[in-house]
Amino acid sequence: MGRKSKPPAPPKEPQEPEGGRKWSEKVEVLLEKVMERFPDVVRLDGRMADEPALLTKPDTVVEVAKYLNSNAILPLNYCRSVTGIDKVDRFEVVYNLAHLPVPGDGFDLEFERIALVVVIEDRIEPKTETLMEIWRSADFQEREVYDLLGVGFDGHPDLRRILLDEEFRGHPLRKDYPLMGRWEDMQAINAYLDEGQIKALKEEAGLEFNPDTDVPPNYKR
Amino acid sequence: MGLLDKEYNSNVVLTTIDAVVNWSKRSSLWPLTFGIACCAIEMIVVQTSRFDLSRFGAEVFRPTPRQADLMIVSGTVNQKMASRVKLLYEQMPAHKKVIAMGSCAISGGPYVNTYNVVNGVDLVIPVDIYVPGCPPRPEALLDGFLKLQRMIDKETLAKKKA
């Protein structure tokens, strides 16, 4: 308690996976179509060898998701899981999407898959749009992300805690949550990032730094 | 027993009310069917033929708290679970006993002081027997069970001395 620790610097990741990309032609065609259709709002991250990631922002995620779900090339009809990541200067909500064969297509265990990543830069009041209307399986998992990370989902009909008790305060999977004890002890602990460190992280990622929105009150010493 | 020596035939048994009541209590304990975490696996094994809890009179795990009088808390109790455990305990009829099984139920174990774990189930309900281990071997739970029976044997209906 009260020990100041610095999060380890993220390792330098290779831009291309070793052994080349392994996804199929259909996925490649779909990725090209998506980049053509949403050139400004979608960024492709191809570092994972077998699962390409499409990065987008909260205000555009619904149209991208609708296109991924209903396109004619490779309709991604199944949401395998929803996870959230606290990247210290931003939140990321990851939808792992897959194309499951419909009856008549034959059956293959190696299904096509794509990750849709929503990058949320607002750390004080992080929120994105719900994709529950498109993939019903996102319902409980979005609630779990809300519960543990505090990311809001606009339009979700029943957004409340799912794992923790109703009186719980705070969101324990955030990096600034204390390792020992509860939210109430938080006041006694100095947050481990100061303004300068957040600024450096933002600049490293090629993003603009705004001290009013980027530094949460907890982080200010 | 000097006064009563050789006064009765061999078909007469002399005992105390305490001994009879305690014998019936300890020989027919009805555990509640519920396991919270990994210790529950060891609790289930105790019931199988290899370890055979039924030798000591507790073979049937009841699925409803209203028919049970022994609660084996086998696992980590978290903040959300605590109110449910308390509710189950309160629904059990009187003369009820509680065994806290494993480090987590005793003190929070490896998860002590984390954000959602109760530091020991005895903060929520009264506990009679603590069985340490992570998880305890089935023999350890049997030992705890026998200790509970010995504890019941010492109970008395008489008024406590002031």
Image (tube, coloured by chain):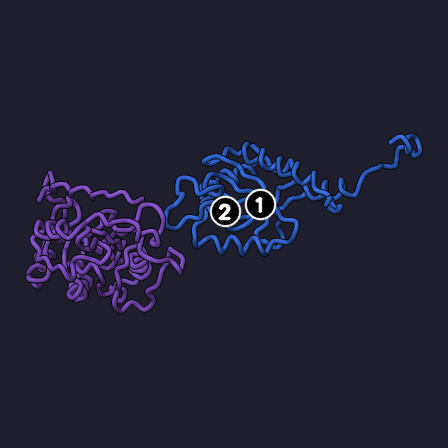
Q: Residues within 10 Å of mark 2 (few under 14, many from 20)?
A: many
Is residue B6 rendered to the left or right of residue B81?
A: right
> Chain A appears in which tint?
purple
Task: Report if residue B115 is visible in the image.
Answer: yes
Pointers 2 and 1 in contact (CB under 8 A)?
A: yes
Q: Same subunit under labels 2 and 1?
A: yes
Name the residue carrying label 2: B121
Q: Looking at the image, which residue is at 7% across and 53% down?
A: A206
Identify the image quadrant of residue A97.
bottom left
Q: Amino acid at mark 1?
A: Val
Judge by depth and name the residue closer to the eye, A163 or A95: A163
Q: Looking at the image, which residue is at 24% across and 50% down?
A: A191
Pinpoint the chain carrying mark 1: B
Pinpoint the chain carrying mark 2: B
**Image quarter hosting the N terminus of chain A:** top left
Which label sits on residue B57? Answer: none
Q: Give coordinates of residue A182: x percent, y percent.
A: 35, 51
Is residue B129 rendered to the left or right of residue A88?
A: right
Vertical comparison of B25 with A146: above or below: above
User: Secondary structure under badge 1?
Assistant: strand
Is residue A174 rendered to the left or right of residue A162?
A: left
Whole-number angstrom distance, CA of label 2 to CA of label 1: 10 Å
Q: Looking at the image, which residue is at 11% across and 41% down?
A: A12
User: Secondary structure under badge 2?
Assistant: helix
Q: Amino acid at mark 2?
A: Val
Q: Residues within 10 Å of mark 1 (few under 14, many from 20)?
A: many
Q: Give coordinates of residue A172: x percent, y percent.
A: 31, 52
Task: Report if residue A25 is visible in the image.
Answer: no
Chain in blue on the image: B
Name the residue carrying label 1: B98
Q: Which of the two discs, 2 and 1, sits closer to the camera?
A: 2
Q: Give coordinates of residue A149: x percent, y percent.
A: 28, 55
